[in-house]
Amino acid sequence: MKQESQKNYRIEYIKPGCIGCRACAKICPNFWEMEDDKTKPFPKAILKLSKKVINKEGVVLKETLETNDKETAITSISICPVTVIKAFETKTNKQLEKL
Ligand code: SF4
């Protein structure tokens, strides 16, 4: 079986804590977009192309994306005001620092 090559960094987003401030989608639109749900007063961010952990009620708890784009990963963790975005080195699991 062919194995996908592992990327150098992993972004983890704890979605329930998002307050919908839109900063990530505005500053890093290549990684982030906002939910298009008019029924919600504060639509949450979506980490594009991510793997999702969903509970049995269908609520997305966590989104994870592997990337080699360290700069955007660090920008993402630095701009989120409620620290629900974290990034790690894939090999070592060492957490990347904010700017
Ligand atoms: S920056 Fe943080 S709080 Fe703001 S929309 Fe993005 S994930 Fe949500």
Image: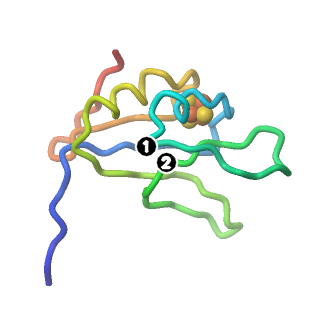
Q: CA distance from mark 2 to mark 1?
A: 6 Å
Q: Is the shortest distance between ligand 1 and the CB of mark 1 under 8 Å? A: no
Where is mark 1, residue-wise? 31
Residue lying at 34% horizontally and 34% vertically, measured from the top left = 73
Quarter holding the C terminus?
top left
Q: Characterize the local packing of mark 2: few (<14), some (14-19) or many (20 or more) Cα atoms within 10 angstroms.
A: many
Whether 79 is drawn above or below 92: the answer is above
Describe residue 22's horizontal placement relative to residue 24 as left or right. right
Describe residue 28's horizontal placement relative to residue 44 as left or right. left
Answer yes or no: do the residues labelled 2 and 1 have beta carbons within 8 Å?
yes
In the current view of this chain or complex, which residue is farthest to the top?
Answer: 99
10 vs 22, nearest the viewer = 22
The disc, 2 or 1, on the residue closer to the chain's N-terminal end is 1
Residue lying at 49% horizontally and 60% vertically, measured from the top left = 52
Badge 2 element = strand
Q: Which mark is residue 86?
A: none
Q: Which mark is residue 47?
A: 2
Whether 26 is drawn above or below 35: the answer is above
Rendering coords of residue 38 (x, y %): 82, 49
Disc 2 marks which amino acid? Leu
